[in-house]
Amino acid sequence: MSVADTRTPGFGDIPVAGVVERISVPKAVRDTLTMARRGLLKFKHNPQLLVDVTIVPVVFTVMFASIFGGVIAGGVSGYLPILIPGVLVNVVTTSTVVVGIQLREDMDKGVFDRFVSLPIARIAPLSGSLVAANLRYLIAACLTLTVGLVMGYRPGSVPGTLAAVVLVVFSAFALSWLFALMGVMLSKASAVQGFSALILTVLGFMSNAFVPPQTMPSWMQTVTEINPLSQLISAVRLLAAQGRVDEHLGWSLFGSVVLIAGLAPLTVRIYLKKL
């Protein structure tokens, strides 16, 4: 094959790789949505990828309600307004880990290497997987609320509860950039899973998700108060119970925006260098 045959018509001597870098923003958005559709099809053909957002909400809600309900609130029904927002936030944020694990696995398998040879935006495989993951977060949130309703949970504000779900999904999307960064930096999917499990275990259990902070040692109460998950859980509880907002909502939104603004450019830069 001649050298001329390896060039793209209309671009002179610019290689195909150079053309990809000149892809317009609208096309990059379309490519991202195409890659997101690929991610959704993976869920369809491999339902096991949804186990953590379909089984875990049921297990966590029933288990923690049965274990802590009588001790903390004198019964399951009195504990559910405390528990459901806590489980909702914990289950959804925990499911963000899958983004980093699948990203690392795809890079190890050479899937992204094949994408680079296609006339698509180089960022599309990364951004598409993050967009597709929002469906997983929404499934986890809806199932948690459904199980809670079956067990007797009655939120005080329907619009507030819907707003709380949107807030949690947005916060999970922001947090997923952290694990996407781990996915492109660490060399093994098992390493991503190990580090992320450590982070989320500490954040999840050293929060106000399952027990009142007043029952904790003084030093742990301080950690709990500044824990970002505690801020998010408090905002969700107030939205669902009364449909009101306070400083917890502001801090949650601020933290999510900071995560996206700080981690997204860094993740994209490292990701593109490794392609």
Image (cartoon, grey):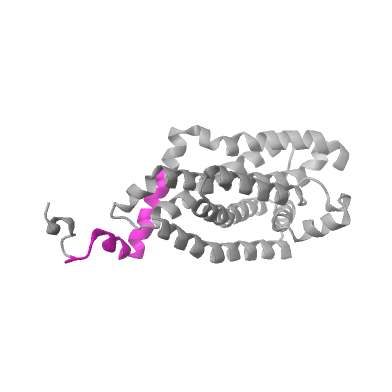
Q: Position of residue 179 (x, y in %)?
A: 56, 52
Q: Which residue is drawn at 59% across and 44% down?
A: 193
Res 117 visible: yes
**Quick one: 180 or 186, which is closer to the camera?**
186
Look at the image and say whether residue 37 sits in the magenta stretch.
yes
Q: Which residue is drawn at 75% across and 61% down?
A: 226
Dominant SS type (magenta): helix
Q: Which residue is drawn at 82% across and 38% down?
A: 68
The image shows residue 182, relative to residue 76, as above or below, that is below
- Count of marks overlaid on the render: 0
Q: Where is residue 207 in the image (x, y as percent from the top left)?
A: 76, 52
Q: Where is residue 52 in the image (x, y as percent from the top left)?
A: 59, 38
Compared across the picture, whether 37 is left or right of 199 comes to left
Res 74 visible: no
Q: Residue at x 74, y 34 (%)?
A: 63
Q: Residue 143 falls in which quadrant of the image?
A: top right
**Could you tell me which quadrant the C terminus lies in?**
bottom left
Compared across the picture, whether 145 is left or right of 271 comes to right
The image shows residue 173, relative to residue 261, as above or below, that is above
The image shows residue 87, relative to residue 251, as above or below, that is above
Q: Where is residue 8 in the image (x, y as percent from the top left)?
A: 18, 59
**Quick one: 135 or 196, which is closer to the camera?**
196
- Magenta segment, which residues? 11-38
**Quick one: 209 or 161, which is closer to the camera?**
209
Look at the image and say whether residue 137 sits in the magenta stretch.
no
Compared across the picture, whether 81 is left or right of 21 comes to right
